[in-house]
Amino acid sequence: MSAAPGLYLSSTGSYPRIGDSPELQLLRRTIVALDRGDRSTADLLDVQNDVTRFVIAEQVKAGLDVVTDGLIRWYDPISHSAGKLDNIQIKGLVRFFDTNTYFRQPVFTGTPLKRGHLAAGDYSFARNALGHLPTPAGKAGKLSIKPVLTGPYTLAKFSLGEQHANGSSGPFAALEDRAQAYSEILALEIETLAQLGAELIQVDEPAAIKYPNDWAIFEASLAPLIKARDNFTKSGRKLELALYVYFHDCAPFYEKLVALPVDIVGLDFTYYPKLVDMIAAKGSPKALGLGLVDGRNTRLEDPAHIARQIERILPKIKGERAFLGTSSGLEYLPRDRAFAKLELLSKVRSELKGGRP
């Protein structure tokens, strides 16, 4: 088997915040105590920092090349960013796709305004935390932190425009208007993240393949993000945008996805068993995120089987460059199974190297 030098092991985003042991329950206990008034927001921040450091260390221990902060500070993928904007009110709970998790729904009360960073502070903390970890053998200069943003279309799809008391609709009743407003704000955040040193930014757009009738709105909402990347890279600096989709069958959209002006497309392979066959036949004009390990199922896949799948499709991907990860974030699994899934990625790479670690 080949060594697959262009294959990187990458987090797909979230990691479980809570575990079974008492120390892994500390974040939950602190949130409850904060709600009771027995702890301060500073206490919560300290615990979030400790958990984030631990999660980054776990990813490095598992052998990943590209890690995230585990999205430990996120209450959910929608209100985390939207709730930081002026003229957005956060309302009731709505189920997030077909998961057993919920998000707090944003409602526009006017033109949203960015009053601070959405992800830049979290990225800076995570980058510093990674820098203080011992570097594993052979990984010097090869580890990186990837910030994650929920994309403008998905934010807009799960937000509402304001409804006036007289029954009339506010200025952001139209989905495309909400998507464009979010997009312009996210473009500013991408500029900030790039200036701080982020060379790869993941943009999550799971709703794009769930609601195909909105494709034109989704595609238009990417334009400010692409412009922000291009403005940064035209001076010779590095910045790549990775668009990730999951929670639905992406096969019908495959050719449209890889034609988008992003640098990497992350795919969930768990909904369509023949997606490997499709990519092997059609190839890809850009790097891919290979969600071949199920991020929502505790069952551990066979590393040799996944290695064989990669051997089929990697030569068909431009530059033979791909990012092996889970199909989605891992917050849906118990902590021990989430770590086992990350370790599985390293076992796949070992199989590609002929069994060598």
Image (spheres, rainbow, N blue to C red):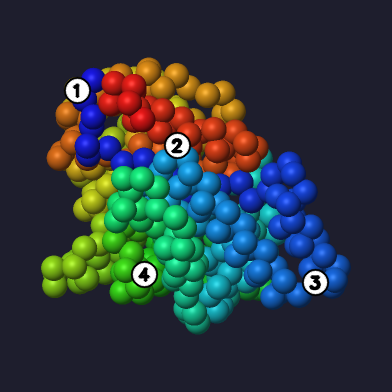
* Disc 1, SS: helix
Of 208 and 130, nearer the camera is: 130
Residue 177 on image: x %, y %: 41, 66
Q: Earlier in the sequence, mark 2 or mark 1?
A: 1
**In the image, what residue occupies the spot 21% across and 63% down?**
238
> Could you tell me the amino acid type at mark 2?
Thr
Mark 3 — residue?
39
Q: Are marks 2 and 4 in contact (CB under 8 Å)?
A: no
Relative to residue 39, is residue 92 depicted above or below? above
Q: Earlier in the sequence, mark 2 or mark 3?
A: 3
Horizontal side of 319 relative to 25 (left or right) equals: left
Mark 2 — residue?
326
**In the image, what residue occupies the spot 32% across and 68% down?**
197
What's the mark number on residue 281?
Answer: 1
**In the image, what residue occupies the spot 19% across and 22% down?**
281
Residue 74 visible to an observer of this rendering? no
| Crowd band around label 3 with a 10 angstrom C-alpha radius: few (<14), some (14–19), many (20+) | some
Please name which of the two marks, 1 or 3, marks the residue nearer to the observer.
3
* Disc 4, SS: helix
Name the quadrant of the C terminus: top left
State the CA–CA distance, disc 2 to disc 1: 23 Å
Mark 4 — residue?
193
Q: Residue furthest bottom?
A: 115
**In the image, what residue occupies the spot 48% across and 37% down?**
342
Q: Earlier in the sequence, mark 1 or mark 3?
A: 3
Q: Earlier in the sequence, mark 2 or mark 4?
A: 4
State the CA–CA distance, disc 3 to disc 4: 31 Å
| Crowd band around label 4 with a 10 angstrom C-alpha radius: few (<14), some (14–19), many (20+) | many
* Disc 2, SS: strand
> Could you tell me the amino acid type at mark 1?
Ala
Name the quadrant of the N terminus: top left
